Structure formats: C-alpha cells, structure tokens
Amino acid sequence: MNILHLYKDYYPVLGGIENHIKVLAEAQAAAGHQVIVLVCDPGQHTRIKELDGVKVIKAGRLMTATSMPISLTQPVILARLRPDVVHIHSPYPLGEVSNWLIGRGKVTIITHHSDVVRQQRWLHLYGPLLRRVLRAADRIIATSPRYIETSPWLWPVREKCVVVPLGVDVTRFMALQQPYAGPFTLLFVGRLRYYKGLDTLLQALTHVPETRLTVVGEGPMREKWEALSQSLGLEGRVVFAGEVEDADLARWYHQAHLFVLPANTRAEAFGTVLLEAMAAGLPCITTEVGTGTSWVVQHGVTGLVVPPRNPEALAGAIRQLLTDPDVRRRMGQRGRQRVRQEFSQQRMVQGVMDLYQAILA
C-alpha cells in the first residue's frame, strides 16, 4: 500500500500531532508499506530524506501566518504523487484545500485532531471551505466519541466519522518501580501553551500548601507562568524542568504521586500525556472541556474531572487524593489496566490500517 501523510511539520519538530504521525508512519513502513510524509521545511528550500524507512519530503516555505506555513512547493509536490491513501492531519488548511483541489490519492482520510479554537475571525473565512473538505473525505478519524458529539464541524458529518483513539507505548511507562517516597508531588507534562491551563494549577497550589509541582516542557508561556509562580509565593515548591530527553521521560512520571492536566479550552482535544501518566500508574486530574480529556480519565475510576479555570475546584480534587493513598493506588491500577486494554500504540496503528483497507476494498 502506498500511504501519504500530509501535515505542516514533522520530527524533529516536537508536538502531539507530529509525534502521532511519526509513530504511524514508522509502524506502517515497518509493516512493508511505502510511506511518504509531506510537510513543510522551516526554511525556503525543499529537502528530502529517509528516516526509519519513511520518505520525508519537507517542502520549502515562504512564510508562516496564523501558525500555518505558506508554501507554493508543497501543493505542487502533492499534485505529482499518486498514493493509495492520502492521510491528512487536521487542522491544516493548506493541506486540506490542496488535496481537495488537486490531490490524486485513491482515498482521503482526515484525522481531525482538534477544532480551530483561537483564530475565530480567520475561521469565518475558512469555515465554508472546511465543511466542503470534510464532506469530500472518504472517512474522518476522531480520537474520541466525545469530540464527535461536541464538535460543530464533525457532528454534521458524523456518518463519515470513525473513532480511533490515540495510543502510547505502554511498556515504556509501565516499568515496575516502588511508589515515589518523596514529598507529595504533582506532575504536569506538555507544551507550555495558553490552553494547557497551568496558571489555574499554580493558583490551586496556594490552597494546598503541602504539595509540590514539577513542570516538564517548554513553550511560549513559560516566562509568564514562572513569573506567576513567583508572584504567588510558590518558590521552592514549583520546578520548571524544561524539555527533557524523550528516553528519560518515563522517569519523571515515576517521581510523582499525581498527574494534573488543567486544560481550559477545546484546543486540548485528547491529552496523550494522560495516557502516559496512567500507564505509569498515576491517578489523573483533568478538566471538562467537552473533549477527550474527560473520556480518557473516568471520573471517580481512574482519576477526577473538575471544571476548567476553577482553582478552588482543582485544589479540592488535589486535596481529596492527597489525603487518601488507597484511592490513589486503586485509581492508578485501573488507569494502567485501561491504557493497556484500550490505548496501546499497536491498537491505534491497527485501527488506522483496518480503516484504510476497508475503504480501499
């Protein structure tokens, strides 16, 4: 099978979608399929190389506007390719429209990773085109049933939607270790972007003075959130660890008692870090933003779900689990079992391949 993945960026650019494409593409190539990833280069020159069996074409870009690369080369390359499957990773307007107009694949699959949340003024212009793109696709992958129910873009085309949840390398995070014996520690992992809601967690910490927090990740909000931490008097209790080596990530999960993802908008569409934390045996606290976060974390079973932008509610949930180690242990065990059964990378890859084969047949 000839497979083309279409998006704006790829490894070594770090991000949830970029990592998802890398996992899919490498697994498909390892299974003997011909796989091309077509993205945009950070610079103006087109580069082609093979990485782990995957042919990666990075088309030169002219500029970047509203987080989207502008490239004249990428559509030209796309028009020359004849894959069996074009797999678009959305939101990516340039790729979506280019494939709709000039793509030559036998079938088109779109993984709708997230609605466009912040650029609402721009979305008024692009929205009508996006609806046509979605209607023209052969199938649309949603990462959770919750997102189909709540997305104004997916619900009108729900008959085309298939749920294939994201997955993680379960064994990587499941290494058996003794429970962390240090001071009660919360963990946050992710890009430091506005929608992650770390400011809410910092404010919640002022109500739970016996806790500490480790923040793993980099991003545009780091400086502002470090300043907020200092202004709240959290010196000595909050550690901004920055970006860590991928091979070392599991160790950070095993140096915490509880994982928190306090997202505040629908831009947090799923929360793969929740799967990593659950695989490591951590109970999770997250927020109800109408996306996969409150589907992945089962309230009262594998963790707790609270309203977004509510430091008091978040602090109450933290305190509830802080004071009951038996509940934490049971939630952690159930979370680990849920990830093993429902959210492995193998299950995710197989779900995508089954979909390809069904449509091509």
Image: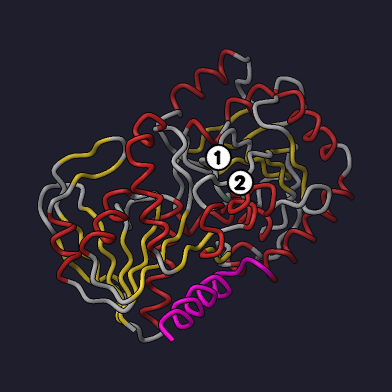
Which span of residues is magenta-colored?
Answer: 342-361
Residue at the spot 11% in from the left edge and 48% down from the top edge: 44
| Picture coordinates of residue 71, whole percent (x, y) | 17, 49
Residue placed under numbered mark 2 in the picture: 150
> Is 202 placed left or right of 19 in the picture?
right
| Picture coordinates of residue 356, whole percent (x, y) | 44, 77
Toward the left, the furthest residue is: 45
Is residue 349 found inside the magenta-colored segment of the image? yes
Where on the picture, by quarter, is residue 54?
bottom left
Sort mark 1 into few (<14), some (14-19) or many (20+) by Cα contacts within 10 Å: many
Is residue 113 found inside the magenta-colored segment of the image? no
Which residue occupies the foreground of this view, 194 or 136? 136
Locate the C terminus and report the quarter of the image it occupies: bottom left
What is the three-letter code of the residue carrying label 1? Arg
> Is 183 placed left or right of 138 in the picture?
right
Residue placed under numbered mark 1 in the picture: 266
Q: Secondary structure at mark 1?
A: loop
| Picture coordinates of residue 301, whole percent (x, y) | 82, 53
Residue at the spot 15% in from the left edge and 70% down from the top edge: 80
What is the three-letter code of the residue carrying label 2? Thr
Determine whether 26 is above or below 360 in the image.
above
| Picture coordinates of residue 103, whole percent (x, y) | 24, 66
